[in-house]
Amino acid sequence: MVSLLTRFMSFFRFTVRIYPYIGIFFLIIFKIFLPGIFFAINLEANTNNLNKQIQTLLKNLDLKQVSCGISVVSLKKNVSVYNYRSNNLFSVASNMKLLTTAAALDYLGPNFTYETSIEANGVITDSGKLKGDVVLKGSGDPNLSGRFYHGNILAVPESWANAIRSRGISRITGDIIADDTIFDRVYTRPSWSKNQLSAWYCAPSCGLSFNDNCVDITLISSKKPGNAVILLINPDTSYFTIVNNCIGTSDKKEHAYSMYREPETNRIFITGKFWINASPKREWVTVYNPALYLATVFKEVLEKYGILVDGTARLIDETDVADAHRERITQTTSTMGQTISVTNKRSQNFYAEQILKTLGAHVNGEGSTKSGIDILHNFMNKLGFHSDEYHIEDGSGLSKGNRFSPHMITSLLTYMYKHPHGKVLYDSLPVSGKDGGLKDRMVSPQYKNRVHAKTGYIAKVSTLSGYINTPNGDVLAFSILMNNFNNLRSIHKVQDDICRTLINYYN
């Protein structure tokens, strides 16, 4: 384009000398279009410069075998800014949560309310005896934990026990029944690694959940080599059997331990060695049968509060029917907005799977993963993508089988930026140099707070997608998907450098 402009200027000077009036005409036309011509030249030069800068970053030796795709879109100008293999499919890790939470906002909205109710199923006598059962009716709420109660794991069941006591009930002749039927009882996904199902990030989903469906175990040094490590269990419940074979060691190099829950049981094994000078370390182990977990803990809390329970803690079954005297004693609520914030800020897989089944239950009438995935397909169809163009296996991204293109993700981000509830999604994303997975990334003043994006990581998969607020007032939707790498730190650096390059480009 530059050489063309040079030839035109030579022709213009020749015309002015030979034909002055025609030259004046050309001068007027040239004056009108000259700014646009120079803008086009400058835009092309800048775009080429941006392409070269990002391509240089992608030539990093640590990316030699890496599969990578990038899409960047200017939301103010509604134009694509940069693409690199943007239509190829990649494993997306926790970027999958963007789709799950966006669909929840689109179909249910941030004010959708989870309601967990405590119901007396029977007759309450004047003497304070409930001739019947107490039913915990679940709604799929993932927020029944200490997260919103100053870290007090037992805050919710204790509030229920207080309500039972305030109703005048001092004895329950029946059972504590966990009604988890809002969801199915398929707790985990077959695509999840079997040897990681004890880990908190593989927590099971359930219609009635408690403490992220985990038990907190804090290891405390006994200060003597060979002695068993001290365990602090929270909540302290009979629901678990813990076999502690972890002992103290004076050799720091020997400090290594593991926790393992036997499949489909609540037998937890702790093995290894714990350095005697180490600080206490808190870990989380998943539970089996979460609804029964909550019912058991609640029964124990009731008894601690002096309320006798003649029966047992159990799951609801087909023989249970609602009594004509069924009464709601109390309820606990939370919102989808709260849930989405935790899902994305903390990258909580359990929350994402709860949202997925919630979509299935309330939109399709079936609280299953398959039903929830059907809703995600419908949402992707709204964005213009057919179900055979990508692949979904769960709602959290824990499965490597979730495969999308960068272009699909920026299309989703573009759609949500204009959505009535788009700010809820935006505010739920980690912020560079501030919180979540970006707390320690892009921390210098010129980049801090400018990137709002969802991180993602599983083995050999690292992703970063979200929004960049540029210095000149534009907003970019971007997606960087990287698969098949060896060094996560190097991958994070390249992702951050790409974000910095985009911020500098619009400075």
Image (spheres, helix red, strand yellow):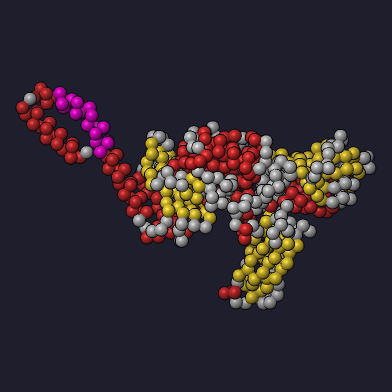
Number of numbered labels in the structure image: 0
Question: Would residue 216 appear left or right of 381 to someone viewing this image?
Answer: right
Which residue does the image show at 82% across and 47% down from the upper left?
Answer: 176
Q: Residue furthest right?
A: 127
Residue 205 forms part of the magenta stretch: no
Residue 99: give x, y in percent of width and height: 54, 42
Which residue does the image show at 47% across and 49% down from the upper left?
Answer: 90
Which residue does the image show at 35% across and 45% down from the upper left?
Answer: 505
Q: Is residue 447 above or below residue 63?
A: above
For the C terminus, which image quadrant? top left
The one of 203 and 453 positioned closer to us in this rendering: 203
Q: Residue furthest front?
A: 388
Residue 60 seen by the camera: yes
Residue 267: give x, y in percent of width and height: 73, 62
Which residue does the image show at 62% across and 42% down from the upper left?
Answer: 370
Residue 27 forms part of the magenta stretch: yes
For the N terminus, which image quadrant? top left
Residue 61: give x, y in percent of width and height: 37, 60
Which span of residues is magenta-colored?
A: 25-41
Residue 346 seen by the camera: no
